[in-house]
Amino acid sequence: MLSLLFENPIIFVMVLVALIVSITIHEFAHALAVDKLGDPTARYYNRVTLDPRAHIDPYGLLFLVLAGFGWGRPVLFDAINLKNPRRDTAIISIAGPLSNFLLAILLTVIYRYLPVGIFLGSFLYLTIMYNLMLGIFNLLPFHPLDGFKVLYGILPIDLSWQWKQTESYGIFILIILMLTGSLNTIIDPLMSFGMRFLGIR
């Protein structure tokens, strides 16, 4: 895949733009949820915007292109400003992956039912794929991914505090999954299901 990217500048640009769009939508959705739930932190840091410059971490984007995993700039919030901190944390956290899934569905409608041509069709396909990938990956229940905070917010309070104690182990679990190839074993079937569900594979 990497050799293809560097051999074909058009594909490289399409992948880069598709990733920028996907990450921007993801982080914007987090920021919008923070803002709508009454915390001014995201707006204070100028994150309630669709401007990619507010959301893209250059190193995170580079890692995503080269290694298949990466990150955007995290959206900060202050739980003190939330009416129901546990519930609202779950809402803020799930907003990112949910936005990726919704965008994938919208782009699939365009891809399948409009005469988009080969170039635009290829870009749409890549963007759909990366949005699915980001949505699925971020819902894994390991800190610092969104899935960890979603579970924290929806579990009964006694279990949620027990779950919170596992936070420090999350990054190590992710590293082990990546190094052993187990991460692909988890994500690939979900990606295949998602693409089949959308009817584009």
Image (tube, helix red, strand yellow):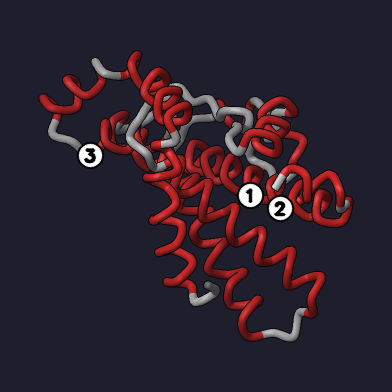
Q: Quadrant of residue 71?
A: top right
Q: For marks 3 and 1, give the CA distance.
A: 26 Å
Q: For marks 3 and 2, give the CA distance.
A: 32 Å
Q: Is 17 left, or right, of 184 in this rendering?
A: right
Q: Position of residue 85 (x, y in %)?
A: 31, 29
- Which amino acid is tagged 1? Ser
State whether residue 166 is above or below residue 185: above
Q: Position of residue 107 (x, y in %)?
A: 62, 69
- Residue at 79% x, 55% y: name it: 14
Q: Is 124 left, or right, of 31 in this rendering?
A: right
Q: Answer yes or no: do the residues labelled 3 and 1 have beta carbons within 8 Å?
A: no
- Which amino acid is tagged 3? Ile
Q: Give the labeled residue for mark 3.
A: 154
Task: Please rate how many residues cluster around mark 2, counting C-alpha atoms within 10 Å: few if below 14, some from 14 to 19, many from 20.
Answer: many
Secondary structure of the residue carrying tag 3 is helix
**Badge 3 or badge 2: first in the primary sequence:** 2
Q: Nearer the viewer, residue 43 or 18?
A: 18
Secondary structure of the residue carrying tag 1 is helix
Q: Which mark is residue 22?
A: 1
- Residue at 42% x, 27% y: name it: 174
Q: Give the labeled residue for mark 2.
A: 18
Task: Please rate how many residues cluster around mark 1, counting C-alpha atoms within 10 Å: few if below 14, some from 14 to 19, many from 20.
Answer: many
Q: For marks 1 and 2, give the CA distance.
A: 6 Å
